[in-house]
Amino acid sequence: MRTRRKDDINSLPHLREFRKELRKSLTPAEATFWKLVKNSKFEGRKFVRQHSVGNYILDFYCPSERLAVELDGSRHFSGQGAAQDRERTAYLESKDIRVVRFENRNVFEETEWMLDMLRANFRFGPPTQPTEYAPHASVRQVKTTPSVPAEDAETATPPS
């Protein structure tokens, strides 16, 4: 067994049993999503189920992309549920983890759209095959020149 660093916030031991129980009792939407992404089937990216970051357990997490996928049922649309989701998202974003949320129905009714949204949220490279929802690589522009403050813009010379 490896020794944990004090600052390691992933898969905390006190949540181990709860994560196991959640994996055993996936919702229908989670089970369907898992079939789409398990074993690195989706774009070669590894996803894990019920991964914890701090005291939050994520529905799905792609470590290489630092991307959390949350599938939301009706409780997430109530005032309290929405507030808890905002707090959770703020915490995860503070740890440099992006969060994408889908309604459970999207897994069944808009599967291709949902997968395209995931592709569009990958940090490291454009989608392997552009689709109508995820932009083509030429549309995704990465700024490679340093930004120039507005007051210096008039005197700045463009890079050669």
Image (cartoon, grey):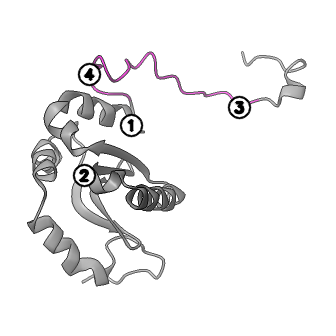
Quadrant hosting residue 133:
top left
Q: CA distance from mark 2 to mark 1?
A: 22 Å
Residue receiving disc 4: 129
Q: CA distance from mark 3 to mark 1?
A: 23 Å
Q: CA distance from mark 3 to mark 2?
A: 43 Å
Residue 42 seen: no
Residue receiving disc 1: 121
- Residue located 21% across and 77% down the image: 18
Taking depth in this image into account, of 71 and 2 the one nearest to the observer is 71
- What amino acid is labelled 4 in the image? Gln
- What amino acid is labelled 3 in the image? Pro
Q: Along the horizontal axis of the image, is 92 left or right of 129?
A: right
Which segment is the magenta one?
126-147
Q: Are marks 3 and 1 in contact (CB under 8 Å)?
A: no
Q: CA distance from mark 4 to mark 3?
A: 30 Å
- What amino acid is labelled 2 in the image? Gly
Pick whichever of labels 3 and 2 is earlier in the sequence: 2
10 Å crowding of disc 1: few (<14), some (14-19), many (20+): some
10 Å crowding of disc 2: few (<14), some (14-19), many (20+): some
- Residue located 28% across and 64% down the image: 51
10 Å crowding of disc 3: few (<14), some (14-19), many (20+): few
- What amino acid is labelled 1 in the image? Asn
Q: How many marks?
A: 4
**x and y percent of residue 9 in the render?**
42, 73
Residue 137 in magenta? yes
Q: Are marks 4 and 2 in contact (CB under 8 Å)?
A: no
Residue receiving disc 2: 73
Dot in front, 4 or 3: 4
Q: Along the horizontal axis of the image, is 47 left or right of 99?
A: left
Q: Secondary structure at mark 1?
A: loop
Residue 149 in magenta? no
